[in-house]
Image (spheres, grey):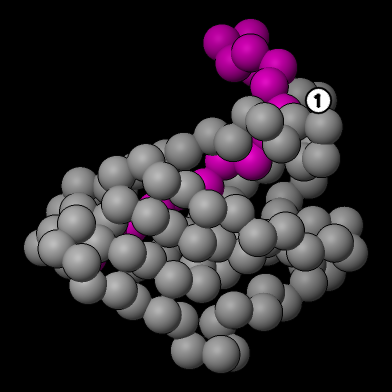
């Protein structure tokens, strides 16, 4: 399971894109079972946030999830995100090695 974060930038929104701020995370589920709970650590502007996404990610697919409730926090620049743990529909769990749970700050 991997997670990439893209923060929507209202200043760069094109004519076909609404001006939305918040945090967008793209997940890749490489397992044969659905992911049902994903824990992500995000670092943004010197602060660290722990997020829990309970939306299912189907087996062997990518999914994009927008956290609109974070629109007052995340706006305009990219966040560094790392997956912390994932719970799968069969009850199994993946935990990230310790070095993956501390995102490296952006330059």
Which region is colored magenta? 14-30
Whether residue 9 appears in this view of the structure is no
The picture places residue 34, in percent across and down from the top left corner, at 20, 53
Q: Is residue 9 left or right of residue 40?
A: right
Q: Could you say whether the residue bearing mark 1 is in a helix, strand or loop?
A: helix
Residue topped by disc 1: 11
Q: Quadrant of residue 51?
A: bottom right
* Residue 20 on the magenta segment: yes
Q: Quadrant of residue 47?
A: bottom right
Considering every residue shown, the one lying at the far bottom of the view is 98
What residue appears at the point 45 percent right and 81 percent down from the top-left corner? 96
The picture places residue 38, in percent across and down from the top left corner, at 43, 58
88 up-or-down from 96: above or below: above
| Quadrant including the N terminus | bottom left
98 up-or-down from 21: above or below: below
* Residue 24 on the magenta segment: yes
96 up-or-down from 67: above or below: below
């Amino acid at each position: 399971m991997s997670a990439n974060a893209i923060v929507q930038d209202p200043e760069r929104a094109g004519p076909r894109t609404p001006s939305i701020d918040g945090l967008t995370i793209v997940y890749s589920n490489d397992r044969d079972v659905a992911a049902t709970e994903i824990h992500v650590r995000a670092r943004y502007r010197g602060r660290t946030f722990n997020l829990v996404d309970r939306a299912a990610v189907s087996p062997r697919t990518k999914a994009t999830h927008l956290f609109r409730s974070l629109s007052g926090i995340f706006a305009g620049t990219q966040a560094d995100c790392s997956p912390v743990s994932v719970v799968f529909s069969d009850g199994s769990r993946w935990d990230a090695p310790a070095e993956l749970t501390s995102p490296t700050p952006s330059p």
